[in-house]
Amino acid sequence: MANELATLTLEDCLEALIDYRGKTPRKTDFGIPLITAKVVKSGRIEPPNEFIAEEDYGAWMTRGYPQIGDVVLTTEAPLGEVAQIKFLPVALAQRIVTLRGKRDLLDSSYLLYLMQSQEMQAKLLGRSSGTTVIGIKQSELRKIQVALPPIAEQRSIAHILSTLDEKIEINRKQNETLEAMAHALFQAWFVDFEPVRAKLEGRWQRSQCLPGLPAPLWDLFPDRLVESDLREIPEGWESVPASRLVEFNPSEQLRKETEAPYIEMAALPTAGSWPEPPVLRPFGSGMRFRNGDTLLARITPCLENGKTAFVQSLPDNTVGWGSTEYIVMRPKAPVPAEFGYLLARDAAFREQAIRSMTGTSGRQRVQSDSVAAFKLAAPSNEAVWDAFSGVVAPVFKNIKANAEAIATLAQLRDTLLPKLISGELRLLDAERIVGA
């Protein structure tokens, strides 16, 4: 393929380069999603959490409107993250440029993968400037040279790689659905006491099923709510501190310099339970944990951003370790391990943790004693815990399977990408690999 490559500057390949640097939009709580550098990660656009008002959209987007399929590139903090626009309307923030390939010269989907290649990332870095914050000027970006195969080949390469990305996205969406199911069950049983209210209000008969609660579990729940120091709770349940149900920062032995799985704060997700893969590192000092433990960030802004993980990926009977800036939560028997993670994601629990933070404004943290004192209602009947585990444990087992499939597919994509871009791997061979 090498002799078929056409070498051009990026500027010569583009129909549009939209750059909103130097402008700051007026942000609102809802409206048109704003694509910022913070939500462009790992080849995709994460759900935006900043917006501009619909009435400001036309006045703001005076330099051009993005289109479906356009590629967004972060120009600093960080430099070089790319993704493709899949939905409209969107507004473009600072530190983001939008690239659109010329018809029949540069396929925009191929550009998405080309910009992720090591060669292009090195070229971006080579033309960057700055010390504390590294970025690239538009004038330098335009000068980057790209080697393009024929357009039909570009489209075939993009199709192969996007097929893998689509499979990854399907698994990711499935995990979002599974997470939502688990959270809904936790909310219904332990926060809203929906089974009790349904019985109390006559909305649930023995012959019927409440979501997440098959009819045979009818007798596990009372039909009355009673006053407690917390609020109304199911009759026979107790108002207890979280420390009655969960051990915070449990003791684990790990000798100095022992090589063990390490999970840093950056590896904790802001949404979902699955962290980035642990890496082996000699133990120095830090929190220690096992499979089934929950890691809750305790510093600002990581706590507010939702950094939390449910550990499932360690080898059996292995102790992992990591940052001193998260709290380890381990439910006590008979409370299932998944309850600890769902509690850590509970809105009221997190609100108390955030309110309890102390320290300077730039480095606040919550102490484990503060979250351990969080009050919640606990059933005295162990069968309730068994029933809850029977529903949520398979959910998290499926989440684990999907997450492992995502990792395998991502590794395959990342292996194929440079080989396809360089022409080292033939398209037919790549298609057979992906098909398998």
Image (tube, helix red, strand yellow):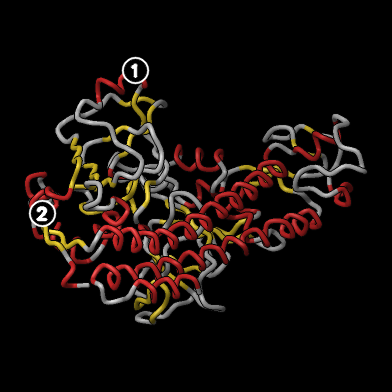
Residue type, label 2: Thr
* Relative height, residue 427 to residue 246 (above, below): below
Can residue 295 be seen here? no
Counting from the top left corner in percent of width and height, residue 122 is at 16, 63
Name the residue that disc number 1 marks: 55
Residue 9, numbered label: 2
> Label 2 neighbourhood size at 10 Å, few (<14), some (14-19), many (20+)?
some
Counting from the top left corner in percent of width and height, residue 406 is at 48, 64
- Residue 23 falls in which quadrant of the image? top left
SS at badge 1:
helix
Q: Depth check: give the residue in front, 6 or 309.
A: 6
Counting from the top left corner in percent of width and height, residue 38 is at 31, 45
Residue type, label 1: Glu
Q: How many marks?
A: 2
Residue 152, numbered label: none
**Residue drawn at the location 37% of the way across and 51% of the way down:** 44
Can residue 328 be seen here? yes
> Label 1 neighbourhood size at 10 Å, few (<14), some (14-19), many (20+)?
few
* Relative height, residue 179 to residue 280 (above, below): above
* Distance from Cα at disc 2 to Cα at disc 1: 37 Å
Q: Which numbered disc, 2 or 1, marks the residue that appears first in the sequence? A: 2
**Residue drawn at the location 29% of the way across and 60% of the way down:** 154
- Would residue 364 be found to the left or right of residue 312 on screen? left
**Residue drawn at the location 34% of the way across and 54% of the way down:** 43
Counting from the top left corner in percent of width and height, residue 187 is at 66, 42
Nearer to us of marks 2 and 1 is: 2
- Residue 60 falls in which quadrant of the image? top left
